[in-house]
Every structure is written in C-alpha cells, then in structure tokens.
Image: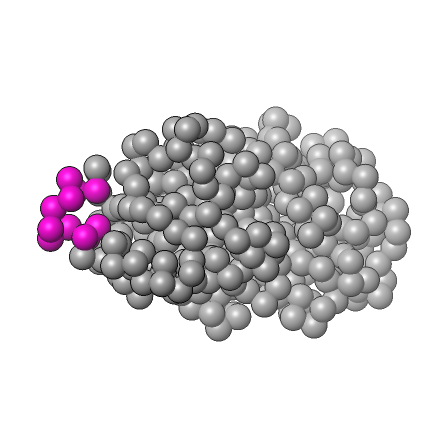
Amino acid sequence: MKNLIAITAGEPESINSEIIAKTWNKIRFKNKLLIIGNYSLLKNQFNKLNFNLPLNLIRELKEFKKFKLNILDVKISNSSISKRKYILDCIDLAHKFSLKGKIKGFITAPINKNVLGKNFLGVTEYLAYKNKVKNKEIMLIYNKKLSVVPLTTHLEIKDIFKNITFSLIKNKILSLSENYKKTFKKNPRIALLGLNPHNSENKSDSVENRIVKPAIIYLKKKKINISGPYSSDTIFMKKNRKNFDVIVGMYHDQVLAPFKTLYEFDAINITLGLKYLRVSPDHGTASDLIGKNIATPQSLISAIKFLNEI
C-alpha cells in the first residue's frame, strides 16, 4: 500500500471530478490511485458528465481493490462551514497517511482558498503549519525545462513590500536549495529577481540594495548557487532563462504569469520543505467550466507521473 498516490477531492463545486475522471481514463498505473473525498458526491458528478467508472467505496485503506477507482469516503453536508471542514478533513487524512508512510505522497485537487479563512493564504501555508516548518515551505512550480518560486504567495500587491525581508529570502532560498537537491538529485542554479521595475535603477535606498543584494552575498557564502538580482522584464527571455533551473521572484504573478505563458498546463505545483511529497495541479477550480466537459487533465496527469517516478 505504500506505493499509493492519494488525491484529495478538493473544492466540491469545481472541475475536479471531471479532471479526475479524465485522468483515470488516460493513465496506465491505475492501481496506485486513491481518491480521498465524498463517495456520493463524486459518483453523482461522474454520472452527470457521463463517465462510467469502476468505483469502489472504502472506509479503510485495507479495503483497497485493484482495477477499481477507490474512494475513501469523507462526510460532507451542504453548509459552507461543513464544506470547509470537508476540504480540510480530506487534506488532514492525506497528511496523516503521509506521515505514517501509508502512501507515497498526495495531490491536492484545487480549492477555493477562501475556505481556509484569514489564517492561511493557501494549502501550501496550511501544510507548512501542519508540518511546523513556517517560512521554509517552498511553492515550486515545476516544468522539466524550468521552475519558478514566488517568495510570497497569495498576498495582495499592497502587502508584498513589507513582507520582503533578509530573513525571508535567506530561509526560503536555503530551504529551496536543500530540498531541490534532495528531490531532484541536483544542485539548482538559482536566479533571484528584484522587487521593482529595473531593480529601482540601482538606487542606494532601494529594497534591491538594502535587502536583496545582502541576502545574495550571504547565500553565496553558504555555497548556494545563486545570482541576481535580475530584472523580471528580461529574465524569461530564452537566452537568459536557459542558464537557470529555478527563477525566484518576490511575488506570485511576477513569476507565475510569464511561466504559464511559456508552459501553460504543462506544469505542476510541488511543495518542498515538508516531511513528505505534496503536489497539486497548476490551475484553479475553474468554476466557469463546471459541467462543460472541456477541462484539461494534463496538469493532474503530470502530478501523478511525477509522484510515480520520484
């Protein structure tokens, strides 16, 4: 059972059931998949989309059956409070199974981040809290050609500046280098971006000169393969990005927007720095696509393949 890959069902009102069904129909290693979610809800959604799948309801891992899409049943009701509990119950089960070594790793299907409340910006931060590794968790958006990391994740633009500190850069980059090497067996070549356009034209009182450059000097002394700060308007040009394994930005869209323009859905979100492997598709709940049967499962398939091969 230790080679099982769990998928938490995520947001009930989403494309998750559609991409799970399409993924099941496309992958070869079906006997490694375990869905953690509400059986009745998923079955009903599969039926509405005309997916005829060999479902198996289980309440314990020992009830897992080969050649079936096994769903570990988790309770849910219609209230918003219950929906939040349901989503977190699914994630908590995957977290517990991972810590106990009962599964190889898990994939979190997309959620509406509002359900996490004000305490957590996303699942990455929630799992960092559960693992007690605050400021060492890394959101690595991964493609075999290039990866990107935002130092801050789902912050509003007005809040980014005050969160960029020497300590944050130091802790995140040290964790990135250590865990990237552990996961991919390679010492990463890291490019660090500045915060402002053109790195504030090298003004002496800029965040680039006061915080970013000193952090780079410190990290180089720690034998981290890092350089910068680079300007974000040119780093993603082909001649520049080919020199790096990871481009680290100061905020979410600084690196995610160009990355998704380059690779679209051919990417996955890997959380480094936890006590286990957690991955997620690199897209949201796509509520506007519910029931249309046009969602692409590519990112979920890539996430499963990654966990299967690692």
Figure coloring: one colour
- Choose between 76 and 197: the one closer to the eye: 197
Q: Kindly tell me whether residue 41 is visible in this rendering.
A: no
Q: Kindly tell me whether residue 224 is visible in this rendering.
A: yes
Task: Give the residue at x 18% y 52%.
Answer: 209
- Choose between 186 and 260: the one closer to the eye: 186
Q: Position of residue 95 (x, y in %)?
A: 62, 66
Q: Position of residue 284 (x, y in %)?
A: 50, 41
Task: Give the residue at x 83% y 49%.
Answer: 31
Image quarter (top left, top right, bottom left or bottom right) of the N terminus: bottom right
Q: Is residue 308 left or right of residue 214?
A: right
Quadrant housing residue 101: bottom right
Magenta: main secondary structure equals helix
Task: Give the residue at x 36% y 58%.
Answer: 220
- Choose between 101 and 214: the one closer to the eye: 214
Quadrant housing residue 90: bottom right
Task: Give the residue at x 84% y 43%.
Answer: 54
Q: Is residue 20 left or right of residue 220?
A: right
Would you place residue 86 above or below residue 255 in this image? Answer: below
Q: How many marks?
A: 0
Would you place residue 53 above or below residue 93 in this image? Answer: above
Is-magenta flag for residue 82?
no
Q: Position of residue 237 (x, y in %)?
A: 39, 28
Residue segment shown in magenta: 199-209
Q: Position of residue 302 (x, y in %)?
A: 65, 40
